[in-house]
């Protein structure tokens, strides 16, 4: 089941990115709702465009970092964690590999989801980023859940 989740995230991310790259011109925006656009941007940096103007070394650094995290996640999955941490690791792994594939194939990551309110725009992101965020969120939920057992007697023992 783990590999189905990882593969689905990776494959869906890459299919949508290829579709956006072939259907849009760079910088093109299509309004979907009053607060959401589909766009076509490329990000050579990290989250929110950090390091985008770093001169090129960031591509290799971010690729190696993501591959290192991926190895750690694979090791964590071999430990047979409970369902919520396992789901978290799979989502993060699939997202990390999706962005690594972009960096290796294209030299940068394709972003296409653009949420905004009035004149304020959240930086564009992609499905891989969404999976990473959801995986991290699930890890936080699991940590909170572990901190507050359902049975109050467990906490006192």
Image (cartoon, rainbow, N blue to C red):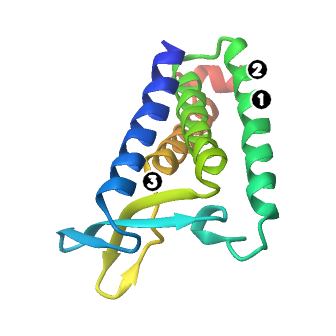
* Disc number placed over residue 126 in the picture, else none: 3
Name the residue at 77% across, 66% down. Answer: 56
* The furthest residue to the left: 33
In the displayed structure, 153 sits above or below 139; it is: above
Name the residue at 18% across, 74% down. Answer: 34
Q: Quadrant of residue 155?
A: top right
In the displayed structure, 77 sits above or below 66; it is: above
Which element carries disc 3, helix, strand or loop? Answer: loop
Q: Are marks 3 and 1 in contact (CB under 8 Å)?
A: no
Name the residue at 44% across, 72% down. Answer: 122
Q: Are marks 3 and 2 in contact (CB under 8 Å)?
A: no
The residue that mark 2 highlights is 75
Q: Quadrant of residue 94?
A: top right
Name the residue at 56% across, 27% down. Answer: 90
Cα distance in 3D space between marks 3 and 2: 26 Å
Q: Left or right? Give the position of 96 relative to 38.
A: right
In the displayed structure, 58 sits above or below 128; it is: below
Decide which of 100, 73 is in the foreground and name it: 100
Picture coordinates of residue 89, whole percent (x, y)? 60, 29
Picture coordinates of residue 123, whole percent (x, y)? 48, 71
Decide which of 67, 143 is in the foreground and name it: 67
Q: Left or right? Give the position of 15 relative to 65.
A: left
Q: Are marks 2 and 1 in contact (CB under 8 Å)?
A: yes
- Of the numbered discs 3 and 1, the one sitting upstream in the chain is 1
The residue that mark 1 highlights is 72
Q: Left or right? Give the position of 121 relative to 59.
A: left
**Badge 1 local density, few (<14 within 10 Å), some, or many (20+)?**
some
Q: How many marks?
A: 3
Which element carries disc 1, helix, strand or loop? Answer: helix
């Amino acid at each position: 089941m783990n590999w189905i989740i990882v593969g689905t995230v990776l494959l869906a991310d890459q299919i949508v990115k290829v579709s956006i790259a072939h259907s849009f011109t760079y910088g093109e925006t299509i309004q979907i709702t009053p607060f959401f656009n589909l766009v076509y941007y490329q990000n050579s940096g990290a989250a929110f465009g950090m390091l985008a103007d770093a001169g090129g070394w960031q591509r290799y650094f971010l690729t190696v970092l993501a591959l290192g995290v991926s190895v750690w996640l694979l090791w964590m999955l071999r430990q047979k964690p409970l369902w919520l941490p396992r789901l978290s690791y799979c989502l993060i792994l699939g997202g990390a590999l999706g962005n690594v594939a972009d960096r290796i194939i294209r030299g940068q990551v394709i972003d296409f989801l653009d949420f905004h309110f009035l004149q304020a725009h959240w930086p564009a992101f992609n499905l891989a980023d969404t999976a990473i965020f959801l995986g991290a969120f699930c890890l936080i939920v699991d940590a909170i859940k572990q901190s507050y057992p359902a049975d109050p007697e467990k906490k006192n023992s």
